Amino acid sequence: MKRRLSRQMELDESQSFQGAEDANVASSSDPPPEQDPESTRSNFQFEGSGMVIPGAFGLSNLHVDIKRHDIKNFFGELGKVKKVVIKPEVLQHPRGGEMRNGWFEFDSSVHVEVEDVMKLHGEKLLGKPINIGLMSSTRSSTFFISGYNKDLELDRIKKQLINHFKKCGKILKFYFPKQTDTENYLGFCYIVLEFDAKEEVNEYDVEEKDGSLLEDGSQLAVRAASLKASVLKELKWS
């Protein structure tokens, strides 16, 4: 059943947005391209819609075998590192190779200048140049949803989805595409979901909702959106 639903999602999305190239929506979990550190040091920053968290920094392009003590030792000369989180997911870097993402936080008893931390952006840790960015309190990702009862009123569909995903995060906005000739809503939508950047909930937890049931018994199909961010920005969100 899940395989059939996933296949239907691919057909729905491709038919409604023909010509759109597949690309992941930018989010804090997307691996930034490896660039010249000197060209990005002053403006590189992890995406997020909330306030910057003092003393906390996001990391990407980490070696897949990296340990917490490696990160603590790497930044330890600047101050005491209180917490390190290494994301369990192994990601594929756009230029090839595997990597992990994560973040760390300095102890509140020490004051560390942001500029001093960012000077290490692009330096090698376990042989890989790491990307460092400021951490914001929230971040968001876009997901493609289908399988709900499209004959229900739009407000009821929204309410069902909000309740269904509330343990994952807050739905910031919806996009329900229509047929161009009839103005009828199609049987899928996009949602933008906001996460607390420090929580363990992430995109993979949301995709675990694939095949789950709404309160009316409808079986959802869920995946990360595959349209370009520039395309998604042009959609009429509600």
Image (cartoon, rainbow, N blue to C red):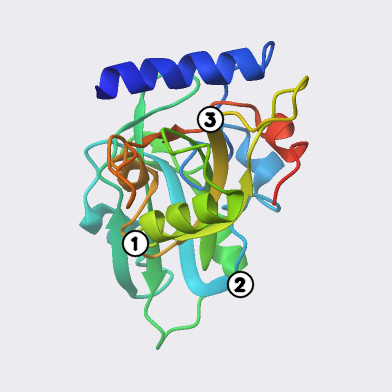
Report the amino acid beneath label 2. Answer: Met
Identify residue for label 3: 187
Nearest to the observer: residue 209 or residue 87: 209
Which element type, helix, strand or loop, lies under badge 1?
loop
Q: How far apart are marks 3 and 1 (CA)?
A: 24 Å
Q: Position of residue 162 (x, y in %)?
A: 46, 58
Between disc 1 and disc 2, the foreground one is: 1
Q: Badge 1: how crowded within 10 Å, few (<14), some, or many (20+)?
A: few
Q: Is residue 231 visible?
A: yes
Q: Which residue corresponds to the image point at 56% horizontal and 37% vertical from the top-left? A: 189
Identify residue for label 1: 167
Between disc 3 and disc 1, the foreground one is: 3
Q: How far apart are marks 1 and 2 (CA)?
A: 22 Å
Between discs 1 and 2, the one toward the N terminus:
2
Split into 4 quadrants, where in the image is the N terminus? top left
Report the amino acid beneath label 3. Answer: Gly
Identify residue for label 2: 51
Q: Which residue corresponds to the image point at 35% horizontal and 22% vertical from the top-left? A: 5
Q: Is residue 133 shown above or below 29?
A: below
